[in-house]
Image (cartoon, rainbow, N blue to C red):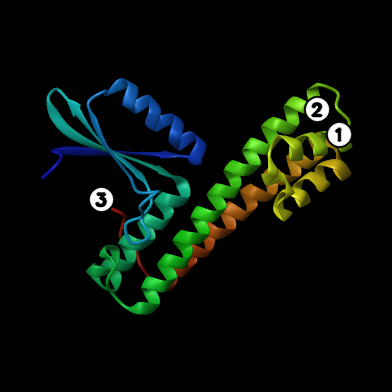
Amino acid sequence: MQDLAGCRVEVDNLMEQDRVVDELKRIFPNFKEDDRRERPSHGYRAVHLIVEVEEHPVEIQVRTHLQHSWASASEKLSDMVDPEIKYGGGPEEMKRYLADVSDLFADFEMQEVKWFQTRVLVQEMAMQSVNLDELVAKLVEKDEKYKDQKYKQMLERIKTEGFMGSVHKLDLELNALRETMNAKLQEFCESLTIGSEDTSR
């Protein structure tokens, strides 16, 4: 047994997750870290820290909202269908579904990080009164990744709609997509009439 107690912190996105984890490490310098984003456990993604509180080991789980939603669904399916689901077992259809949703959530959260980084760069350049064509050229010059099709589309929108309009719309679209993905996962679980709550891993 590696901990005597545990708690969970739920945050909005990967950037906030990194910030909270770094702050916890600062507060609790004697820690053991298990970053399950880099090494998912059967689709489960989160950051776990084992810290010392009054010389006792305590586990702190730090999850994004989407990571928590996935973990809750996995727990519910384990309760409803087969306890082995959350350990990589159970029916193949369920395993594929959870793996696909986990990958979808992870990809979305990485795209969200890229959009945040792009927005910061664009905002900095916009404040320097760089015109939009120059701005796009400077971004591509700064990092080759901006030649990627997804970035090209994003930058084209910024050129077409202007900085503030495009940022607002893209933020709204990201939030709507996040809510849609989460809702579809919840609908799937509700269709199986699952009502138990996520406990711990």
Q: Quadrant of residue 5?
A: top left
Residue 51, relative to residue 114: is it above or below?
above
Q: Residues within 10 Å of mark 2 (few under 14, many from 20)?
A: some
Q: Secondary structure at mark 1?
A: helix
| Residue nearest the viewer, comparing 174 with 19 | 19
| Residue nearest the viewer, comparing 7 with 103 | 103
What number is the disc on residue 186?
Answer: none
Please state the horizontal and vertical placement of residue 63, each as a whole percent of the image: 39, 44
Q: Secondary structure at mark 2?
A: helix
Residue ID at (32%, 57%): 41
Sequence order check: which comes first, mark 3 or mark 2?
2
Mark 2 or 1: in front is: 1
Q: Quadrant of residue 48?
A: top left
Residue 63, relative to residue 52: is it above or below?
below
Apparent side of residue 45 relative to residue 153 in the rendered image (left or right): left
Residue ID at (80%, 27%): 126
Residue 108, relative to residue 53: is it above or below?
below
Apparent side of residue 62 relative to residue 100 in the rendered image (left or right): left
Q: Is residue 145 visible?
A: yes
Q: Is residue 189 visible?
A: no
Gap between marks 2 and 1, in whole Å?
Answer: 10 Å
What number is the disc on residue 200?
Answer: 3
Gap between marks 1 and 3, in whole Å?
Answer: 51 Å
Image quadrant occupied by the N terminus: top left
Question: In this figure, which residue is indicated by the disc labeled 1?
Answer: 134
Sequence order check: which comes first, mark 1 or mark 3?
1
Q: Residues within 10 Å of mark 3 (few under 14, many from 20)?
A: few
